[in-house]
Amino acid sequence: MLKDNNIHRFESKLKRVDRPGMDNLIAYIRKSDFYSAPASTRYHLSCEGGLLQHSLNVLDAMRGLLLPGDGRVWEYHVAGQVVCTIPDESVTIMALLHDLCKTHYYKTSTRNVKNEQTGKWEKAPFYTVEDKMPLGHGAKSAMLAMQFIKLTNTELYAIWHHMGFTDQGADFGTVGRAMELHPAVLALHTADMMASRFMEGESGNKEAFADAPAGREAAGGIAIPASMPPMINDMDEPPVFEEAPPLEPGA
């Protein structure tokens, strides 16, 4: 039930973004393993549907980090000063698509684990990495999204550099400069860390964040700029799942 609710919420958010190609992007996501994949192999939401839950958690964390501005925008404040304003649709795109790179990335394997009750060794499933599209991390998410929709400069920089200084292969000077030019980079990175470090356990959200995000919205637990229209909780049509192969050159 939680997974179904998460799919409804995820797709309704993206459908509210008025961007040519969004329907094709949603269709690709439906056909991929995005809705069933874990968010990681071990540390946070290493479970079926973990990637979907994590993406929604980042959206909630980012909205909680920002303050409502005039109209459908959010403000990023630092020491009482507004360092940037971010359209609501950009917040949605950055949060929900930042880990699109993790489609076709994990696989399920088995290993021998000792049953503490019986003392016998048994095979237990676990997630491991088998990257079918080795294009990097944030860069790969941006490139996949841009196969279907056009990203603004802010969205592109934020998704590309959402790992911040935790990206072991990153040029720290480049990341720092990206944050100076587009403070949304730091906002998205911070929200990502908030979700993975504070909100999520290995097999589900931690107790304080266990309620479905849609339920928290209905209860008024997430601040939305007053001029924004009401939340959409239903999709226009139910999801249809087919297998989507990794994107190939020239596809």
Image (cartoon, helix red, strand yellow):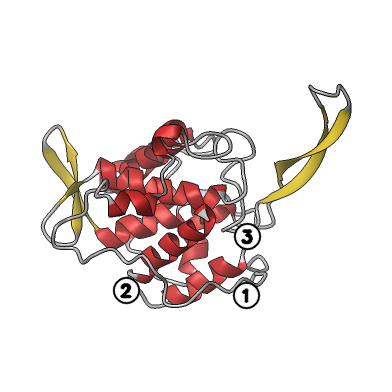
Say whether marks 2 and 3 touch (CB < 8 Å): no
> Which label is found at residue 29?
none
Q: Amino acid at mark 1?
A: Gly
Task: Report whether 158 appears left or right of 25.
Answer: left
Quickly name the residue at label 2: 18
Decide which of 224, 80 is in the foreground and name it: 224
Q: Secondary structure at mark 2?
A: loop
Q: Earlier in the sequence, mark 1 or mark 2?
A: 2
Return the x and y of residue 34 as percentages of the image width and height: 57, 58
Q: Secondary structure at mark 3?
A: loop
Find the distance from the CA under tag 2 to the CA under tag 3.
25 Å
Return the x and y of residue 29 as percentages of the image width and height: 54, 66
Q: Amino acid at mark 3?
A: Asp
Say whether marks 1 and 3 touch (CB < 8 Å): no
Return the x and y of residue 8 as percentages of the image width and height: 45, 64
Give the position of the C terminus as an image quadrant. bottom right
Q: Is residue 208 above or below residue 68?
A: above
Decide which of 107, 201 is in the foreground and name it: 201
The residue lying at 61 percent from left, 40 percent from top is 46
Quickly name the residue at label 1: 250
